[in-house]
Image (cartoon, rainbow, N blue to C red):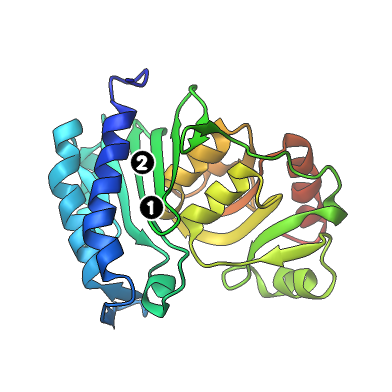
Amino acid sequence: MESGHGLSLPALVALVREVAQREVTPRFLHVTHSRKHDGSLFTEADLATQTALEELLPRILDVPVLGEEMTETRQHDAWHAGRDGLWCVDPIDGTSNFVAGVPYFAVSVAFIRKGVRELGVVYDPIADEMFTAARSEGAHLNGVALPLRQPVTELRRALAGVEMKRIDRALAGRLASWPPYASQRNFGASALDWCYTAAGRFDIYVHGGQKLWDYAAGALILEEAGGRLSSLSGTFDTANIWERSVVASASPELFVLWRDWLKAAGA
C-alpha cells in the first residue's frame, strides 16, 4: 500500500523493524554509554541505528535525513535542504531507559514535506508494537485502528502522561499538589508517550519541551487517531520547530477541558 504521498508505508515499516531488530534489540542490556555535551546519554546503539537509517531511508525516497545524533549544524542544514522532503529520525527515543534496562523506548521516523508531517512510524522493539500514521489515512497499532479505547469524559477520572522536568516550576508544583486528574505516569520516552495518548492508554498528556525528532512522528499519529494537540502557549504548529511544549488528548472534548485547566493554572 502506498500513501497518498507516493511513499510506501509498508516499506518504511519493514525498514524500521529490520533496523531496530538488528541494531537495537541485541544491544538491550548489553551496552555501554557515554554522555553528550548537554548531559544526555548516548550509546553505540544510537549511532548504529542512525547510521543504518541514514543509509537506508533514501532508498525509499532520496531526500535529506535529519537525526538526533547529528551536530546542530548538520541538523539545520538538513532542515533547510529538505523543504521538499525530509526524513526526521530519533534512533532511540528513551535512551536513558534503554541504558537502565527499562523496556520503554522506541525508534521514531517521520517524513516531513514543506513543514507538514506526512508519515510517522514509532516502533517499540521489545513489545513489538508498531505505531503508524499517514496524513488523512488514519493511525494504527500493528494494523489495528487507533484509538484502542476511548478516553474518559471527565478530567478528574483521567490517567495523565505528565513530564515534570521541563514544566514551569509553579505549574509543576500545582500538578504535584492539586492535580485535576486521577493519576499520572512518566515513562521517559516522548515518542511512545504520544503513541500511548493516541491509543487511549493515556487520557491526557503534557510535556514542557520536546525536540523536533521527539514529536515529529508521534504528533502525526495522535492527530490521525482523532486527537487534539497544542503547545502550552498556543497553537502547536506555530511554535518553534526545534523545541515545543505539548498539551494533548485523543479526545477533542477532554483536550479542551485539559487545555483550559492548564491555562487557568497559569500555563
| Residue identifier under label 2 | 110
Q: Residue at x 73, y 68 (%)?
A: 171
Position of residue 251 relative to residue 167, above or below, is above
Q: Using the numbered discs, state the Cα–Cα distance from disc 2 to disc 1 in whole angstroms.
A: 8 Å
Q: Residue at x 26, y 66 (%)?
A: 26
| Residue identifier under label 1 | 213
The answer to whether 149 appears left or right of 6 in the picture is right
The answer to whether 235 appears left or right of 151 in the picture is left
Position of residue 219 relative to residue 105, above or below, is above
Q: Earlier in the sequence, mark 2 or mark 1?
A: 2
Percent from the top left, x then y, of residue 23?
22, 60
Using the rendered image of the protein, determine whether residue 69 is visible from the camera's viewpoint. Answer: no
Q: Secondary structure at mark 1?
A: helix
The answer to whether 70 appears left or right of 234 in the picture is left
Percent from the top left, x then y, of residue 148?
63, 39
Position of residue 65 relative to residue 132, above or below, is below
For the image, the number of numbered tags is: 2
- Check whether the beta carbons of the residues at disc 2 and disc 1 lie within 8 A of each other: yes
Q: Dot 1 surroundings within 10 Å: few (below 14), some, or many (20 or more)? A: many
Pick the residue in front: 153 or 244: 153
